[in-house]
Each structure stands twice: as C-alpha cells, then as structure tokens.
C-alpha cells in the first residue's frame, strides 16, 4: 500500500513538474517577445517622429539584411508571438524572425547602465543571445538583440522539497496504518502455523481494524472447535478400542475349547493379527496428540532393546554396537517405529541389519535387508495407509499396510524424517533421521 501511494505521488509530481516546465517555457517566451515587440514599435514611432534610431536606446538598430545565420537556433513560436504583439500595436511587418545565438557568437550592444555596471563589477558570463529581426515593408530590417532570460534552477529544488514534504505527510500515516493492520495479521499467521493439537489453544488478542479483529475472532473460535473435535475423536477411539478388545478377548478364551490343535493355532493367529491391526489403527489415529511426555533416553540402548526382543523370538537381527546417545524423545513411539521397520525386514527378507549413526545435529537409525526390495517409483507410495505391494509382499506375510505409515507419522511428529532407498547388491535400506537437541 505504501509503495502504491509513493508511486502515485511520484507520478503526480512528475505531471506537476511537466506542467510547470511548460508554463515556465511559455513565460520565458512571453518575457522575451513582449519587450522586443514594444521596443520595435517604439523605435518605429521614434523614426516616424523624425528621431534617429540609435543602438543604445532599446538596442534596436537598422540593418540591410537579416543577421540571423544558420548557426543560430530558430524560434518560430517566439517569432509568431512577436508578430502578434506587433499587430496589437498596429505595426505591420513583412517578416519576423527570431533565433537564439550561442554565447559569444553575437555582439549585443550594451546600454549605459550595463556599461556602468560592467565597469564597476566586471562583465558577467555571456548568456545565450536572443536575436529578433523584423523586416519593414520598405525592405529594411530592424534588429533587436538581448540576453535570453535564464532558467530558474530553484524551481527544481522547490519542487523536490514539496515532494519530500508530501511524502512525509502522506506516507508516514499510511505506513502507520499499514503497520497497525499488518502486525495482528502477522501474529495471526504465526499462530496458525504454530497451531498444534498437542497443546491447548491460546486465544489471540483481538486488535486492529474491525475486519482484522473479525478474522482473529473467527480463528480463535475455529481453534477451539478443532481442539474439541480432536478430543471427541480420542474419546470415540478409546471407546471403540475398548469395545473391540472385549469380544476379541472372549474369542481368545473360547478357542481353547477347539480340539483340533492346528485350527486352534490358526484362530489364535487370526485374533492376534486383529489385535495388532486394531493397535496400529488406534495409534495412527491418535498421533499428533500423544499422551506420552518427552523424556531423555539413550537412543542406542532403546534400539538395542528392540533388537533383543526380535532375537528372543529367534529372528536373525544384527545390531552394530554404538556409543551412548542421549536424546529427548517419546521412547514408546520411537520404539514402535523402529520395531515396524525391523518387522518388515524380517518378514520380507528373513533377516535385518540395524545400525546407529550419530551426527552433530541429528542421529540416524538404519535398518537394512537383502529382500526383494521395492521398485524405485514406488518407494514413496508404500508410506500410504493400507498400501501393500502385491508383487513382493503377499497376504501370507500378514499386515494390512499400516506399519510404514505409522512409522512415518511417528518420526515426522518427532520432527524427523524416514527414507527408503535401494541397497547396493539388492535389498532395501530404511533410514530414520531424528534431530538432536
């Protein structure tokens, strides 16, 4: 807004300057032409009354031909003005010519006053000379020469000062108003970017113009409604989880009465898979509002504990020993993300290699396998919920495609990133990067 106002003021002042320059040009023409016409008419009156025309009186002299040469700059507009003035005085001339001679190229006769001033103070620098030549009906030329009025250089500085005053009087209030509007808008944008369902909403102060305060009030109400909806969602998910776990537990008890051991084991596996699916869905839905607080833990020990759990089950999982690495995070969620990656590697490759790398600003947990891998154009697709690649992962491996989606959500909620990449020699490498500090 301030730039637009400044541009408008600049354009207005430019137009004003053009009009003033045009007016000053017209004034210079009139300033030079009217006295010239008066002196020419006065000289003709002197001649008609029997007095001789002398150059010292009005600087009018008689010449046989026009003194205007090709080196002089013709001034047709001034010539027309001189002729019009002479017509008003009742003086008829055959031709009227006006030209400007460069300084020092045309000798201008000085008046007595100018000669006295030059003798007292020294001659001034010669200005441009305006030469007016008027041809009488008899063929003689009356010539009048004088200094061209100098341009007023103070006009530019006066206009510049006026422009600066206008800028100060107009732009300062505009900048004040713009700041008064933009400050609450910036605070509103910052609050919108910083909104998190993990913390209770803090209402913004409603200030600024009426339109801005209305927007801030609407944002405050919206944040309260969103938080209330998320709270209701958590309560609903808790109720669903409780209601589903109860019949699943009852089914787990009832299958003990099945005599066929193979059928009983198959039913138990199905119930266990349903429980894991339920846990994954509830965990994915509750992310962003975790109840677990951040604590300082040893990341190397946490990863080692997850690896030991798989080893206890007889899985082939290797872990490179790493130094202690203290970090603030939510241990249960990070443990869940690492477990999901190792579980995928064990399912699809039969083994996993886990390592931990520490940097100055981040730490990386790497899970590598020698499985069938994932096509390069599908590496990002597998992070979607309920996405499974049938070409390399069949139904017998279990799962419904939530493991990687849940792992990415956990890591991103912690401010990190998870990336899949093809491994040299075949297989897949999954890297979790977490910020330190």
Image (cartoon, rainbow, N blue to C red):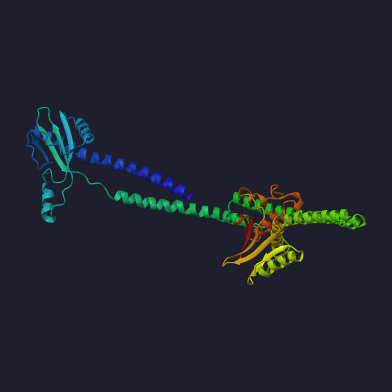
| 432 left or right of 153 in image | right
What's the residue at 23%, 34% (across, down)? Answer: 77
Q: Does residue 65 show up? A: yes
* Residue 41 percent location from the top left of the image: 15, 34
Q: Nearer the viewer, residue 284 or 58?
A: 284
What's the residue at 66%, 62% (across, down)? Answer: 353
Residue 149, quarter of picture: top left
* Residue 178 percent location from the top left of the image: 52, 52
Quarter of the picture containing the C terminus is: bottom right
Q: Nearer the viewer, residue 197 or 37?
A: 197
What's the residue at 91%, 56% (across, down)? Answer: 254
Q: Does residue 207 show up? A: no
Residue 276, quarter of picture: bottom right
| 375 left or right of 146 in image | right
* Residue 398 percent location from the top left of the image: 76, 53
Residue 184, quarter of picture: bottom right
| 162 left or right of 292 in image | left
Q: Nearer the viewer, residue 216 or 239?
A: 239
Looking at this view, name the residue that lies furthest to the bottom.
Answer: 324
């Amino acid at each position: 807004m301030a730039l637009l106002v400044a541009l408008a003021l600049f354009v207005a002042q430019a137009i004003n300057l053009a009009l003033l320059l045009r007016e000053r040009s017209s004034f210079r023409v009139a300033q030079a032409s009217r006295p010239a016409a008066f002196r020419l008419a006065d000289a003709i009156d002197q001649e008609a009354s029997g007095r001789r025309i002398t150059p010292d009186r009005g600087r009018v002299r008689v010449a046989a031909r026009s003194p205007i040469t090709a080196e002089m700059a013709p001034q047709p507009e001034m010539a027309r003005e001189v002729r019009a003035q002479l017509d008003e005085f009742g003086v008829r001339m055959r031709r009227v010519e006006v030209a400007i001679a460069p300084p020092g190229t045309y000798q201008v006769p000085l008046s007595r006053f100018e000669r006295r001033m030059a003798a007292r103070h020294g001659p001034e620098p010669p200005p441009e000379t305006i030469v007016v030549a008027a041809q009488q009906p008899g063929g003689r030329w009356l010539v009048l020469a004088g200094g061209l009025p100098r341009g007023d250089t103070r006009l530019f500085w006066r206009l510049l000062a006026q422009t600066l005053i206008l800028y100060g009087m107009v732009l300062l209030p505009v900048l004040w108003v713009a700041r008064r509007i933009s400050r609450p808008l910036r605070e509103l944008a910052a609050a919108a970017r910083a909104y998190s369902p993990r913390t209770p909403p803090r209402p913004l102060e409603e200030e600024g113009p009426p339109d801005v305060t209305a927007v801030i009030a609407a944002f405050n109400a919206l944040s309260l409604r969103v938080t209330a909806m998320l709270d209701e969602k958590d309560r609903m998910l808790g109720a669903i989880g409780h209601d589903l776990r109860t019949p699943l537990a009852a089914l787990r008890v009832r299958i003990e009465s099945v005599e066929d051991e193979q059928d009983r084991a198959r039913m138990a596996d199905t119930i266990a898979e349903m429980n894991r699916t339920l846990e994954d869905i509830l965990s994915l839905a509750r992310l962003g509002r975790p109840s677990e607080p951040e604590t300082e833990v040893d990341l190397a020990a946490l990863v080692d504990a997850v690896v030991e759990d798989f080893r206890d089950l007889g899985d082939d999982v290797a872990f490179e020993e790493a130094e202690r690495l203290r970090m603030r995070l939510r241990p249960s969620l990070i443990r869940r993300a690492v477990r999901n990656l190792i579980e995928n590697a064990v399912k699809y490759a039969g083994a996993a290699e886990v390592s931990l790398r520490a940097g100055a600003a981040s730490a990386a947990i790497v899970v590598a396998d020698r499985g069938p891998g994932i096509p390069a154009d599908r590496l990002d697709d597998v992070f979607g919920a309920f996405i499974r690649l049938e070409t390399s992962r069949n139904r017998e491996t279990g799962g419904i495609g939530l493991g990687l989606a849940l792992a990415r959500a956990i890591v991103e909620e912690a401010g990190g990133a998870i990336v899949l990449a093809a491994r040299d020699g075949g297989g897949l490498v999954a890297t979790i990067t977490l910020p330190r500090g």
